[in-house]
Amino acid sequence: MHRLKLQPPGSEPIEILIDRTDQLAREAYHFQRGDRHAEVEVETLAPWSGWLRLQGRVVPYFAARTGDTIEVWVQGRRHRLELVPMTARRAAATAEAAATNTLTAPMPGTILKIDVEPGDAFEAHRPLIVMESMKMEMTISSPSPGRVKDVLCKVGDMVEMGELLARLEPPDEA
């Protein structure tokens, strides 16, 4: 699940939760703002533009990203979205995963590539798994060297945030 802040001009920021649905054949998302919910299907025609299917309507969209800010134009209105920084809870979970020799999914998404197999040794920060979420690729690596004990996912798997992807072990002491 992704947490975004929507910044309407001249108003206070609004927090939105976005989660990809289980619709494998299309890009479909569930949006939540407080107790309001909406399902949105995205059809991309070109990078950062296409059609949105929202509540029975089909509307064009255009978007641009600069750093952690995404600006989306829908029906003549500009919406500014800011990616919310990692929370202390999520940072603690990441540190805990490193300490327990596991790789977990940092966000919900789809596994695109697995660059290691059980038994493979790796250096710190070497790409191990590549996943995609909301059209962004993320390379997952370990902060320290080690060896792959088990790979618990496969290419094409849809995973949730925090899902265990691989077990690691310290490098051989030989």
Image (cartoon, rainbow, N blue to C red):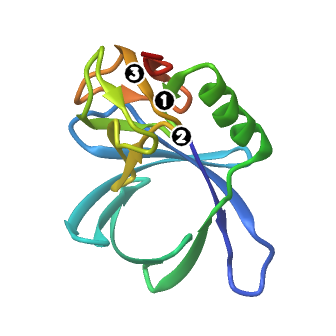
Q: What residue does disc 1 label?
A: 160
Q: Quadrant of residue 54?
A: bottom left
Q: How many angstroms separate mark 2 from mark 1 (CA)?
A: 21 Å
Instruction: Tell me if mark 2 has few (under 14), some (14-19) or many (20+) residues whose alpha carbon lies within 10 angstroms of its own.
Output: few
Residue occupying image coordinates x 23% and y 30%: 156
Residue 161 place in picture, x, y as percent: 53, 33
Sequence-wise, which precedes: disc 1 or disc 3? Answer: 3
Amino acid type at mark 3: Arg
Residues at marks 2 and 1 touching, judged by CB atoms closer than 8 Å? no
Q: Which mark is residue 143?
A: 2
Q: Quadrant of residue 121?
A: top left
Q: Is residue 94 visible?
A: yes
Q: Could you tell whether 82 is left or right of 122 in the image? A: right
Residue 117 place in picture, x, y as percent: 25, 20
Q: Residue furthest front?
A: 174
| Secondary element at image label 1 | loop
| Secondary element at image label 3 | strand
| Secondary element at image label 2 | loop
Residue 74 place in picture, x, y as percent: 43, 76
Q: How many angstroms separate mark 2 from mark 3 (CA)?
A: 12 Å
Q: Which mark is residue 147?
A: 3
Residue occupying image coordinates x 24% and y 63%: 44
Instruction: Tell me if mark 3 has few (under 14), some (14-19) or many (20+) residues whose alpha carbon lies within 10 angstroms of its own.
Output: many
Badge nearest the viewer, 1 or 3: 3
Q: Quadrant of the N terminus?
A: top right
